[in-house]
Image (cartoon, grey):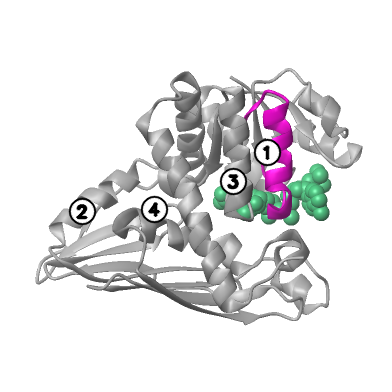
Amino acid sequence: MKYGIIGTGWISRSFIDGARLACDAEITAVYSRTAERGRDFALENNIPEVYTDLEKFAKGDFDAVYIASPNAFHAKYSLFMLESGKHVICEKPLAVTPDEIEACAAKAREKGLIYMEAIMYMHSPDREALRSAMSELGEVTSAHFDFSQFSSKYPAYARGEIPNIFNPKLATGCLMDLGVYCVYPALDLFGLPGKISADAVFMRTGADGSGLASFNYGDKLVTLTYSKTGQDRCGSQICGDRGTVTVGSISKLQEMEITPNGGASSALCPERSKEEIMGFEAYEFEKFIQNPDDEKYALCSRMSLEVSRVMKQIREICGIRFD
Ligand SMILES: NC(=O)c1ccc[n+]([C@@H]2O[C@H](COP(=O)([O-])OP(=O)(O)OC[C@H]3O[C@@H](n4cnc5c(N)ncnc54)[C@H](OP(=O)(O)O)[C@@H]3O)[C@@H](O)[C@H]2O)c1
């Protein structure tokens, strides 16, 4: 399948490598706001066409677009590309608000197109390994999901700059960037929580630098922690009365182990490269394009919306605001 790309950051490169690896994808065009960056990216990634005009790009020779712009532009670009007849795979979080997701999903349905969030958790085959391991844990009594990754942009922030990732005008910050990876497994494994508590710590720019949320399910508390100002070394865990699952990387579902109480640990997944994991997203996206009635597509669409609703609730509790 032919793809156009919006966004020239490193994650677009990973997606391109993954889509080429998994589906032999053909990347025919890239959109950049500046010709020079577009040309450099096209050269590095062997892409024939460069556009700096979004309307001309949308008429380009491709079937689907991968969007990796700052979050604030996800819905605007998605809607425009769907209106232009292209399938859309857009980086997490799929949009800023649930209303935006619903508007894009409605447009996709109207046009007979696929609109999907590029979220590694939902598309990795290791999600199934995690889900089936749950039955070996007995009664799950607590779970903790963490994604705390010291930001490579922190030194620029400390120098007084406002990197995109810490700029509320772009709907970024820690919850939107990393917290989303904790909300996904909580909702996927345990459903919608009864009660949500949350808090956040704010940076000079107004962005949330770190935060936490607690989901009360009546029979268990599921806690989420996320930070862009500190590096986690402990990981995530799901505890039951018969054993525990530990997860080193909750975003990529890597370094997963199960340990029965009093027993030895065993691995739940093979080691995979980032490209391989992103390839799973491209693989499922193309599968949904072939078969829009695929039940997994309905599940992914529902999850995107529910996660977005919960993220909105967390923002409201913490006072996380975007202009
Ligand atoms: N799945 C993952 O593991 C993963 C990892 C990292 C990021 N992401 C997601 O990917 C998206 C992009 O993240 P990023 O860190 O790459 O963002 P970024 O570097 O701030 O921006 C990505 C690209 O968007 C364009 N852009 C930058 N500022 C813009 C602005 N003000 N208006 C319009 N376009 C702008 C730039 O391309 P041009 O200058 O060429 O136009 C830039 O290369 C986010 O949604 C993020 O959540 C996902």
Task: Name the residue type under label 1.
Answer: Ser
Residue shown at 63% from the left, 77% from the top: 319
Residue to which mark 3 is pinned: 101
Magenta region? 67-87
Q: Earlier in the sequence, mark 1 or mark 2?
A: 1
Residue 240 is situated, as x and y percent measured from the top left of the image, at 18, 68
Nearest the camera: 178 or 11? 178
Give residue 237's quadrant in the image.
bottom left
- The CA span between labels 1 and 4 is 27 Å
Residue to which mark 2 is pinned: 133
Q: Per the image, is 86 magenta?
A: yes
Magenta segment, prevailing SS (helix, strand or loop): helix
Residue 172, disc: none
Residue shown at 78% from the left, 22% from the top: 48
- The CA span between labels 3 and 1 is 9 Å
Residue 256 is situated, as x and y percent measured from the top left of the image, at 31, 57
Secondary structure type for disc 1: helix
* Marks 3 and 4 close (CB-CB < 8 Å): no
